[in-house]
Image (cartoon, rainbow, N blue to C red):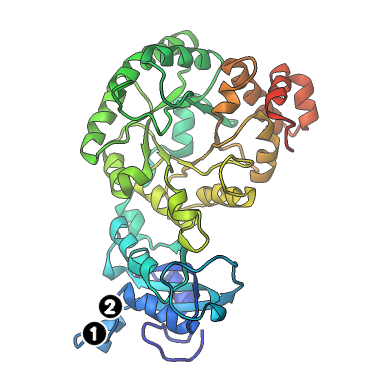
Amino acid sequence: MTETTLPHQAPATSAGAVAEADPQYVVATYHIETSLDLQRAAAVLAGEQSTGTFVRVARESDELRSRFAAQVVDLEEIPLTGSSPLPGAVGDPAKRRRAKLRIRFPLANFGPSLPNLQAAVAGNLFEIKELAAIKLMDLDLPPAFAERYPGPAFGIEGTRRLMSRPSGALLGTIVKPSIGLSPADLAEVVAELAGAGVDFIKDDELQGNGPSAPLAERVRAVMPVLRRHADRTGVMPMYAFNITDDIGRLEANHDLVVEAGGTCVMACINMVGLAGVEFLRRHATVPIHGHRAMFGSISRSDQLGFSFRAWQKMARLSGVDHLHTNGISNKFYESDAEVLDSIAAVREPLLGQTATLPVLSSGQWAGLAHATYAATGTDDLLVLAGGGIHGHPDGPAAGVRSMRAAWDSAARGETTATALAASVDLRRATEMFGAPRG
């Protein structure tokens, strides 16, 4: 930061340190790209998202701006990515520069409200033509948000308690095929998975409340199977029924599950919105499994949208007990480094709230256990293998056993060779999925 006096620029002192510690501000970190002067483009962003518009207006007094204007805290030039500029960006492309930018927003502008926070830190700024790239990378939130939003009710420890799995990786799967099973077929699959010792089963995000397998019929088919298993063993796997729907139906869908003895509900965060998740959290008496479906639409580009690190803070505040992070060697676009940063982000403390359980999914199978454990250093993870369990050459039960053998071996500090020698189910899994990592 320089001594240049620009609109919406914080004083050139130790303002950065003050801003992060000050409970009256939110500090947002962005990556921006522009052909204009970096400081000028940053000031345009800060103005557009607070008191300013394209021209100074009569009532935008110095006193008003001192109280309500967003201010540039600091700006650090970073290398260009080589990606194309956003459509409609102005300026000479040959003069483009990239920067890491922090802006502080007065909490008084929007209060501790997640929807209104988003309007401030991620509203019209994506449309500013002076910016050839704009991505929200992180948020530093004041304690007022924790006072309004209780966060997860169950988190890691509450989930372990309900699963009767006090230690070790929590192992689960997604119902496959995702769509098309009748409730009776679903009951058979659940019985096989429960008998193999799975901890967790979830509906696919594509399976909502459609006419071919309505939520009520799935609940009626699945819960007797799980209760019979619990009567025999004393342990009932957790089943996350997808209750994603219009906000006005979330309570009734939740109650349908809980009244039948269910212990988890699933909501697609981006479909019901953060306000929808928070609405459900206020009513829920079981853990909320937070699916991140559609997240790629706001994160995949390095030129636009949200980073997972920023988004996950708002999702956790809204009340999800479990949050999808993706997994290593996944079938989607994220690199292992990005996935591991996402897992680390969810594991970081957030305003003193209950710890959210990271959920690993996408292309996971038993052969990734040792590499994942080595990279994360924890088994406080819910690891979901869809095809990695259902696609096992000896069937889903063998798929569950292969996962358990691999994760238990990794937690004991054994090598993959030792694990393979000890488990025929793991060896058979390699015939389908290839050599294990780690």
Q: Is residue 347 shown to the viewer in this render?
A: yes
Q: Which residue is mark 2?
A: 51
Relative to 345, say whether 85 is above or below.
Answer: below
Q: In the image, is 158 to the left or to the right of 257?
A: right
Binning the other alpha carbons within 10 Å of mark 2 as few (below 14), some (14 to 19) or many (20 upward) gives many
Instruction: Tell me whether circle 1 and circle 2 mark residues in contact (CB < 8 Å).
Output: yes
Binning the other alpha carbons within 10 Å of mark 1 as few (below 14), some (14 to 19) or many (20 upward) gives some
Relative to 81, say whether 235 is above or below.
Answer: above
For residue 411, what is the image quadrant?
top right
Earlier-in-chain disc, 1 versus 2: 2
Q: Is residue 14 shown to the viewer in this render?
A: no
For image coordinates 24% across by 40% down, the residue present is 247
Q: Could you say which disc has been placed on residue 82 in the image?
A: none
For residue 179, what is the image quadrant?
top left
Q: Which residue is mark 1?
A: 60
For image coordinates 32% across by 15% down, the residue present is 220
For image coordinates 40% across by 62% down, the residue present is 141
For residue 128, what is the image quadrant?
bottom left
Three-letter code for the amino acid on which mark 1 is drawn: Glu
Three-letter code for the amino acid on which mark 2 is drawn: Thr
